[in-house]
Amino acid sequence: MATLRAVTPRPVPQAPAILERNWRLPRRTFLKGAGALLGLPLLDAMGKVAALAAPDAPASTKAAAQVQAPVRMACIYFPNGVWEKNWFPKKDGADFEMPFALEPLAQHRDNLLVFSGLDKQHSHQGDGHYAKTANFLTGLPVRRTAGKDISVGGLSIDQLCAEQIGHLTPLPSLELGIDPVISGIDTNVGYTRLYGCYISWRSPSMPLAKEINPRLAYERLFSVMKAKRVSHADRRQAEDRKALLDLVLDDARHLRNHLGRDDQFKLDEYLDAVREVEKRLEFFSKPDPRVWQPGTHPGDLAAPKGEPGDHQEHVRLMLDLIALAFWTDSTRIGTFMFANDVSGKNFGKLIPGAGGGHHEFSHHQDKAEKFEPYTKINRWHNEQLAYLLDKLAAIKEGERTLLDNSMVLFGSSISDGNRHDPANLPVLLAGRGGGKLKPGRHIASPKGTPLCNLYVSMLDHMGTPVEKFGDSTGALALG
């Protein structure tokens, strides 16, 4: 129902049918082998289109005939808000300085929009966290319930996009996270804890399950058939099976022989990147040496390349998967949750001086012994965002980069964690949206500007325009 979704679609203008695809290599080309499917990056061999116009057609017509890479959108959430004094720039416009928490993003300053003044009016009611996280991407009221009658008011922006353009890619969308879903009731506030575990919603009452196991996410992404359960003896043999890319090696070699030199370099670089991620994922599929296993002797266990409890490695694997998914056009829409709401994660092993619970530090009470580690955790989250942006910026797509052709939304559902305030939300938008955005600015909106105004603009740049979304009152000018 339109009133429930609070989304009013706007008709998309239809382009004249004057172009005919005449690619030397179809864009939706896969390497295939033994049940595996691997999408390809954009190659020069895919980039030529013949216009059905006279040889002396205007240059503008010929320019329009060039294939353009699609725009991708990632929505990334981190919990517990920020220490505002070290997050928001003091000056607006292009002449702003990067505060302490944003300093890791300095090299991407020209590809970054920093927002202040954004708000979610429907998050001012309810508890401190759940009524704010669950509607991070919907902007609508969250029903207070301790039972199964959950509702976040409407679908999220990622799923609105998936409904309209998800059919263009093998996966309509990709939902990733780190923490498992927590069920039960938070008796302090009378809300189900499920609200703190999801940001992606297919309908007001149907969240999208996020994948938290990197290997399972990898296998889903590349359509790898999951192995059947095997005995311990068979598992040893399975550990010696060929890597995923070996299944498609013959197909890759055949394709490579028909490509130009530049495309060969691109293909080699891409396959190397996929293989590297696969190698890093190996330890997630092996038994955990810290847990007793029947019939296993300590001497039989090889040391894992990374500890399954290594939070930063886990996060970066997931961000790598988003980059690979976008690179191969396996999907154009992704979400990622650094942690569930009210996360008490201890960052002591990753950040000197930040030993203690993240949620506890967010209730800083203006005490240095709390807000100092709190702001260091904010900075760490931005370091991980910088890691993803580095990946996207290094991937060329014609004259642009994958970062140029993406929009990466990054933010939290509250501003100051001590106040549980949903006003002045800490939100960033990285990338150029296919050349439609004008980044390198701090956009200081008037107090109370709906966050959903940003979402209306993003939906337009994704080719899924709406007149209204959530509590929006218009669109933010991003160009």
Image: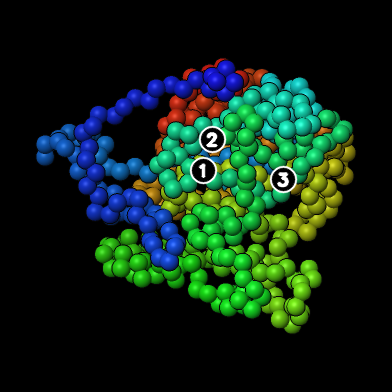
Residue 420, can we see it?
Answer: no
Q: Which residue is mark 3?
A: 181
Mark 3 or mark 2: name the one nearer the start of the chain.
2
Relative vertical location of residue 104 with respect to residue 296 in this rendering, above or below: above
Q: Residue at x 72, y 35 (%)?
A: 195
Residue 95 is situated, as x and y percent measured from the top left of the image, at: 57, 33
Residue 175 is situated, as x and y percent measured from the top left of the image, at: 58, 45
Q: In which quadrant is the N terminus drawn? A: top right
Residue 145 is situated, as x and y percent measured from the top left of the image, at: 77, 28
Three-letter residue code for mark 1: Ser
Q: Secondary structure at mark 2?
A: helix
Disc number for residue 173: 1
Residue 239 is situated, as x and y percent measured from the top left of the image, at: 59, 74
Q: Are marks 3 and 2 in contact (CB under 8 Å)?
A: no
Q: CA distance from mark 3 to mark 2?
A: 20 Å
Q: Residue at x 70, y 69 (%)?
A: 287
Along the line of sight, the residue nearer the viewer: 50 or 376: 50
Other-residue count near label 3 (Cα within 10 Å), few / some / many at <14 / 14–19 / ≥20: some
Mark 1 or mark 3: name the one nearer the start of the chain.
1
Q: CA distance from mark 1 to mark 2?
A: 8 Å
Other-residue count near label 2 (Cα within 10 Å), few / some / many at <14 / 14–19 / ≥20: many
Q: Are marks 1 and 2 in contact (CB under 8 Å)?
A: yes
Q: Secondary structure at mark 3?
A: loop
Q: Which residue is mark 2?
A: 159
**Residue 66 falls left or right of residue 473:** left
Three-letter residue code for mark 3: Val
Along the line of sight, the residue nearer the viewer: 62 or 375: 62
Q: Secondary structure at mark 1?
A: loop
Quarter of the image where one finds residue 237: bottom right
Furthest residue in direction left, as rendered: 55
